[in-house]
Image (tube, helix red, strand yellow):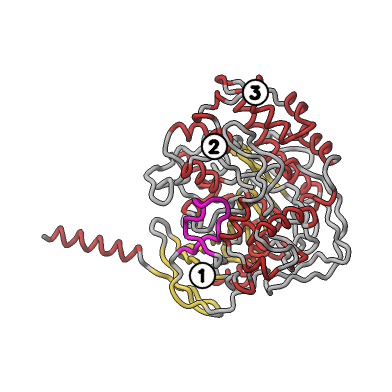
C-alpha cells in the first residue's frame, strides 16, 4: 500500500511538472506558456503578430496586431490555407494564421540577451506550417530563443495584380512583420534583438534569401542560414501577369476587379488552380521537372522586393548549404514499383528536353547515364545528380560567390548524413525508403532542431545514434553561434571568392575542407546561354517612378527612393519546379500519386 502511494505521489509530481506554466509580460499583456515535456524550455504557441488577414486585410499587406495578450498560449495555431489537393486541405487550416510560436530556455529573462533563431518553414509556398511536429522548437531552445513564423501561402500570399490593387509579396511582408515583432518584443522572452538569425529550408530558405537581400535586412537580422534554397532569380510582377490574369479568369473575375477577387474563398482559389495548365504532368512515365510554374514565390516589384535578389546578394553574413542527394526525395517515388532500375533512357531524354530545351544534348554529354550506372540504376542516379546540382548546389554557389564578391562573410556546407530514423511522420518506416532517400532534401532538419528522440515526431519510437546526437549538438551550437556572433565558429572555414572551403558532413562526422562545387562551372555556362533565350520582362523589372525602401505592417507599402535598374542574370533554378517535402510526402503516401508542387 505504501509503495502504491509513493508511486502515485511520484506520478502526480511528474504530471504537475509537465504542466508547469510560465508567464511573459509584454507592454500589451501577459502570455502564459507551458513547459516542454522533455527539455528545459518553455513554449508559447499561437502568438498573434498581425491582425487576421481577412476582410479588408485579405490580399493586402499585413497589419500589426492591435489587441492585448492575456491568457494561455499553449495550443498550436492552424496552418495557413494549403493549396494543392484535397488531402492537403484536410488538416487544421485557416486564413487566420499569422501567428508566432516561441520557445525559450528555463532561465531566460529580459536581461539574458540570448541569441534568437527565427525559423521559416518550407513547402513550396503552397504548403507547410509552424505546427508541424518536425519543427518543434523545444530542443532548439536550450541556449537560445527559437521563433517560428506563420506566413500566407499560394495566391493568398503571392497573387500580384496591380490593376486590381493587389500588390503581392504578402508572404514576404508577413515574415518582415514577424521580424519587426521580434525586434519589439523578444527581450521579454530573454532574447537579444541584435542577435537574430533568420533561417529556413527549401521555400523557407528562398524566402529568407529574398529578405536577406532587402535594404532593411541589417536592421532586422544579424545573419541568415539557407538550407537547400536561395541564390536563385525571381520573376517580376510584369512577367507573371499573363498567369495571374488566367488565374482570376478561372475565378470568373476580371483582372481589374479587386472586389470580385477578394470575395472568392480559398476553396474557390484552390479549385481555380486546377483549371490552369500544369506543365509538366508528373507521373511515373513523364518528366520530373520543367519550366518554372511556381507562381507564388517572391516577385520583383520595385517596392517590397525592389531589385533582383540574386543580383543584389545577401547583406548579412550567411551560411549556404545543400544535401548531397537532394532529389532522391523526388525521383525515387516516381519510379515504377519504386524500382529505380525501371527508369528508361526515354524518360531521361524527355526530362532533359523539357528542362533544358536546346541545351539538352550538352547536359546529356556532361551527365551521361553510363557514368552513374552503379547497380544498374544509371538513369535514376543521373537524374538525381542533375536535379541536385542545377536546382540546389549551384544556386547556392552563385549566392556564395555574389556575397563574397560584395565583401559579405559567407560559409558553406555539404550535408551527406542520412538520418537512421524516419524523420517525418509521413515517411513509411521502412528500410526501402530510408535507404533510397539517403541524404535527401530535408535530411538535415532533425539535427538542426536537436530532435533526435521519439522520431518520427510527435509519437515515434526511434532514436538517432549517439554519434548522430553529438552531430546534432554541434549543428545546434553552430546555428546558435550564427545568431550570437554572425559566425558559426572558428573551426568552420570561411568561403571566399577564390576557394570553396566549408564543411562536409557524413558518417555523423563534420570535416572542414573543400566543398565540391566543380560542377557549377558547367551550370554557369549553361545559365549564360539560357540568358539569351529569356524574355527580359520576366526577370528585369521596369521601376520607373517606383521606390526601393518599403514600409511593411500598416496595411500599405510605401517607398522613398528610386531603385536602380539591375543587371539580370538567370539561374536554371528559375526555370524549374522545386517541390518541398510536405506536399510531396502527403501526396505520395497519402494518395499514392506523385505530384511536384509549383
Left or right position of 37 against 513:
left
- Nearest the viewer among 163 and 40 is 163
Ranked by sequence position, the earlier of labels 2 and 3 is: 3
> Within 10 angstroms of label 2, few (less than 14), some, or many (20 or more) residues?
many
Task: Determine whether 541 is above or below 64 in the image.
Answer: above
Q: Which mark is residue 109?
A: 1
Quadrant (top left/top right/bottom left/bottom right) for the N terminus? bottom left
Which percent across, then down, holds residue 138? 46, 57
Query: Residue at position x 72%, y 47% from top?
Result: 231
Query: Residue at position x 67%, y 42% from top?
Result: 279
Disc 1 is placed on an element classified as: loop
> Within 10 angstroms of label 1, few (less than 14), some, or many (20 or more) residues?
some
Say whether marks 3 and 1 touch (CB < 8 Å).
Answer: no
Residue receiving disc 3: 345
Disc 3 is placed on an element classified as: helix
- Nearest the viewer among 313 and 169 is 169
- Nearest the viewer among 403 and 595 is 595
Task: Determine whether 459 is above or below 14 in the image.
Answer: above
The answer to whether residue 501 of the structure is visible from this angle is no
Left or right position of 453 against 112:
left
Residue receiving disc 2: 417
Ranked by sequence position, the earlier of labels 2 and 1 is: 1
Disc 2 is placed on an element classified as: loop
The answer to whether residue 456 of the structure is visible from this angle is yes
Which percent across, then down, holds residue 31? 48, 74
Report the magenta residues as a range: 76-94
Q: CA distance from mark 2 to mark 1?
A: 36 Å
Query: Residue at position x 46%, y 31% from top?
Result: 432
Total marks in image: 3
The mark lying in front, picked from 2 and 1, is 2
Task: Determine whether 198 is above or below 387 in the image.
Answer: below
Amino acid at each position: 500500500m505504501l509503495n502504491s502511494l509513493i508511486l502515485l505521489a511520484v506520478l502526480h509530481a511528474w504530471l504537475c511538472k509537465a504542466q508547469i506554466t510560465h508567464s511573459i509580460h509584454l507592454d500589451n499583456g501577459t502570455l502564459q506558456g507551458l513547459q516542454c515535456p522533455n527539455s528545459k524550455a518553455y513554449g508559447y504557441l499561437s502568438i498573434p503578430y498581425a491582425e487576421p488577414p481577412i476582410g479588408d486585410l485579405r490580399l493586402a499587406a499585413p497589419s500589426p496586431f492591435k489587441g492585448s495578450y492575456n491568457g494561455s498560449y499553449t495550443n498550436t495555431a492552424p496552418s495557413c490555407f494549403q493549396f494543392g489537393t484535397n488531402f492537403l486541405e484536410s488538416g487544421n487550416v485557416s486564413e487566420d494564421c499569422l501567428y508566432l510560436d516561441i520557445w525559450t530556455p528555463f532561465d531566460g529573462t529580459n536581461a539574458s540577451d540570448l541569441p534568437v533563431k527565427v525559423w521559416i518553414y518550407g513547402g513550396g509556398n503552397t504548403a507547410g506550417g509552424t505546427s508541424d511536429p518536425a519543427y518543434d522548437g523545444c530542443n532548439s531552445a536550450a541556449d537560445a530563443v527559437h521563433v517560428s513564423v506563420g506566413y500566407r501561402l499560394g495566391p493568398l500570399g503571392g497573387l500580384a495584380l496591380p490593376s486590381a490593387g493587389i500588390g503581392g509579396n504578402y508572404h514576404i511582408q508577413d515574415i518582415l512583420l514577424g521580424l519587426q515583432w521580434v525586434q519589439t518584443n523578444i527581450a521579454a522572452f530573454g532574447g537579444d534583438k541584435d542577435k537574430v538569425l533568420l533561417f529556413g529550408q527549401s521555400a523557407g530558405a528562398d524566402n529568407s534569401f529574398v529578405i536577406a537581400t532587402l535594404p532593411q535586412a541589417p536592421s532586422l537580422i544579424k545573419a541568415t542560414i539557407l538550407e537547400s534554397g536561395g541564390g536563385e532569380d525571381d520573376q517580376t510582377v510584369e512577367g507573371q501577369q499573363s498567369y495571374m490574369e488566367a488565374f482570376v479568369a478561372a475565378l470568373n473575375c476580371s483582372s481589374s476587379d479587386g472586389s470580385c477577387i477578394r470575395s472568392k474563398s480559398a476553396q474557390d482559389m484552390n479549385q481555380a488552380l486546377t483549371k490552369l495548365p500544369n506543365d509538366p504532368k508528373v507521373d511515373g512515365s513523364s518528366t520530373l521537372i520543367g519550366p518554372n510554374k511556381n507562381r507564388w514565390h517572391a516577385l520583383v516589384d520595385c517596392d517590397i522586393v525592389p531589385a533582383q535578389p540574386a543580383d543584389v546578394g545577401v547583406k548579412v553574413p550567411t551560411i549556404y548549404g545543400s544535401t548531397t542527394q537532394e532529389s532522391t526525395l523526388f525521383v525515387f517515388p516516381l519510379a515504377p514499383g519504386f524500382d529505380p532500375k525501371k527508369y528508361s533512357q526515354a524518360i531521361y531524354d524527355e526530362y532533359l528536353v523539357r528542362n533544358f530545351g536546346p541545351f539538352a544534348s550538352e547536359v546529356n554529354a556532361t551527365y551521361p547515364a553510363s557514368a552513374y550506372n552503379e547497380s544498374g540504376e544509371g538513369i535514376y542516379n543521373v537524374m538525381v545528380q542533375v536535379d541536385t546540382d542545377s536546382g540546389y548546389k549551384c544556386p547556392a554557389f552563385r549566392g556564395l560567390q555574389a556575397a563574397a564578391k560584395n565583401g559579405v562573410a559567407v560559409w558553406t556546407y555539404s550535408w551527406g548524413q542520412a538520418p537512421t530514423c524516419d524523420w517525418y511522420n509521413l515517411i513509411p518506416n521502412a528500410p526501402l525508403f530510408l535507404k533510397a532517400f539517403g541524404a535527401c532534401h530535408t535530411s538535415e532538419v532533425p539535427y538542426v532542431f536537436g530532435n533526435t528522440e521519439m522520431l518520427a515526431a510527435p509519437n515515434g519510437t526511434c532514436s538517432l545514434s549517439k554519434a548522430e546526437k553529438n552531430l546534432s549538438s554541434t549543428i545546434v551550437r553552430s546555428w546558435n553561434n550564427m545568431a550570437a556572433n554572425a559566425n558559426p565558429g572558428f573551426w568552420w572555414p570561411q568561403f571566399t571568392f577564390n576557394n570553396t572551403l566549408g564543411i562536409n558532413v557524413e558518417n555523423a562526422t563534420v570535416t572542414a575542407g573543400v566543398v565540391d562545387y566543380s560542377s557549377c562551372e558547367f551550370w554557369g555556362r549553361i545559365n549564360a546561354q539560357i540568358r539569351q533565350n529569356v524574355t527580359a520582362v520576366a526577370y528585369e523589372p521596369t521601376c520607373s517612378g517606383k521606390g526601393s525602401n518599403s514600409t511593411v505592417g500598416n496595411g500599405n507599402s510605401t517607398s522613398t527612393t528610386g531603385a536602380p535598374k539591375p543587371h539580370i542574370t538567370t539561374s536554371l533554378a528559375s526555370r524549374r519546379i522545386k517541390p518541398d517535402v510536405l506536399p510531396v510526402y502527403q501526396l505520395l503516401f497519402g494518395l499514392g500519386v506523385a505530384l511536384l508542387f509549383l
